[in-house]
Image (cartoon, helix red, strand yellow):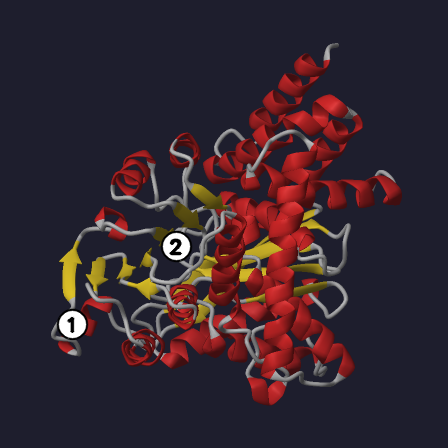
Amino acid sequence: MSAAAKIAAVRANIRQRDPDQKEFLQAVDEVFESLTPVFEKDPKYLDVFERLVEPERQIAFRVPWVDDNGKQQVNRGFRVQMSSALGPYKGGLRFHPTVNLSVIKFLAFEQTFKNSLTTLMMGAAKGGSDFNPRDRSDREVMAFCQSFMTELYRHIGADVDVPAGDINVGGREIGYLFGQYKRIANNFTGILTGKDLRWGGSLIRPEATGYGCVYFAQNYLAHKGESMEGKRCVISGSGNVAQYTAEKLLHLGAVPITFSDSNGYVLEPNGFTQEQIEHVMELKNVKRVRVSEYCAFSETAQYFPGKTPWEVPADLAFPSATQNEIDLADAEALVANGVKGVFEGANMPSTNEAIEVYKKANVMFGPAKAANAGGVAVSGLEMAQNSQRLQWTREEVDAHLERIMKDIFDNSLAAAQKYNLKGDIQAGANIAGFLKVADSMIHQGCV
């Protein structure tokens, strides 16, 4: 069988196994395209890839809990442990109504490459539930988290699997989850990252994904002979990633001009100040209200209900909300509005069709598995601090983060050049991340 025929057969087999898992298959297709030059040059890697796309373990479980009205509720919980080739499983937990096995598998698959790119010793996993914490009381969120951990605890450990936060899993949820683990296991260890500083957390962890994404963009712009200074930036989302993306952009002289949520977006025509960003943080992190409430604070803000920020003219875009938020039409709008770079703070926010639009227009593209790796990188640093029973300074952690993001860009660029893909950072990130995992899997045998 020719190399091309074997590649086609493996791809067809993957699709046949999980025909209904559209998010997972989308993620696999995106990586598969990038890795084709690797498979053609050395066919042994095709066999490894076929093994890699099958998770080492998929866990699904019932999460029963009682709401404030005394009524029983039941949600589904998931943990997909994708790969332990490079270290203990590592990846976040997402609580959102859209969560299903396909979504968690795609996230775990992406996490494999992302964690590899950080150069830290971390395997890959992802988990979560279709529970929606919006409009739930603190007591209800605690009841759900305790029930969720009552099952999850048997599958995790400091040297086994270390979850973290993701969408709708922040400091409050991490605290409830950690408390229940400690209660059941009678053990105070670093089994979660994203913890409060007073009991094992790391400085810069809340900021890490947003800061890291901007550091990645900064490296890409420097490679092109440009800087962040004066660049107008559209940001989607208004959660942790979006907030700290805006803050770091401001630090570097750029101009963040939008935040959004599922109801619409808010525009500050002259850019958000530090004070205004902090007000967005209060609205979203403390009051937990819609981003439209920001307009009561600012006389210059404009709110656009039911729309996305991709219609706003800008220099750079930072999609920081959720998967597939930029489709073909959105990508075309970005290009038409003068955007020269798209850097993904969310996981897989651009459809494959959108990515093709970027490439045809020569738009700088920072794929999620590279650009948003800062969060898991600092999670890895938090694990190291927990093992040492130490807490590093803010400056130490930030310096590590900045170096890691530079290394990710440099390694992605080098991999693209090695396989004659010019400056295709997306392909380079996939190749660099894959080869480290694949070679480790070969060394460890067929397991």
Image spot of residue 31 (x, y percent): 58, 35
**Residue 118's disc number:** none
Locate the C terminus and report the quarter of the image it occupies: top right
Image point 20% across, 73% down: which residue? 294
Image spot of residue 142 (x, y percent): 46, 77
**Residue positioned most to the left:** 299
Left or right? Give the position of 232 relative to 419.
left
Residue 167 location, quadrant:
bottom left
Give the residue type at disc 2: Phe
Count residues near mark 1 (Cα–Cα under 10 Å), then give few for <14, some for 14-19, many for 20+.
some
Image spot of residue 66 (x, y percent): 41, 72
Count residues near mark 2 (Cα–Cα under 10 Å), then give few for <14, some for 14-19, many for 20+.
many
Q: Is residue 192 visible?
A: no
Tell me which numbered mark, 1 or 2, is placed earlier along the sequence.
1
Q: Which residue is mark 2?
A: 318
Q: Is residue 249 shown above or below 44?
A: below
Give the residue type at disc 1: Cys
Image point 51% across, 50% down: which residue? 368
Q: Which residue is mark 1?
A: 295
Image spot of residue 172 (x, y percent): 46, 78
Locate the N terminus and report the quarter of the image it occupies: top right
Q: Nearer the viewer, residue 229 or 113?
A: 229
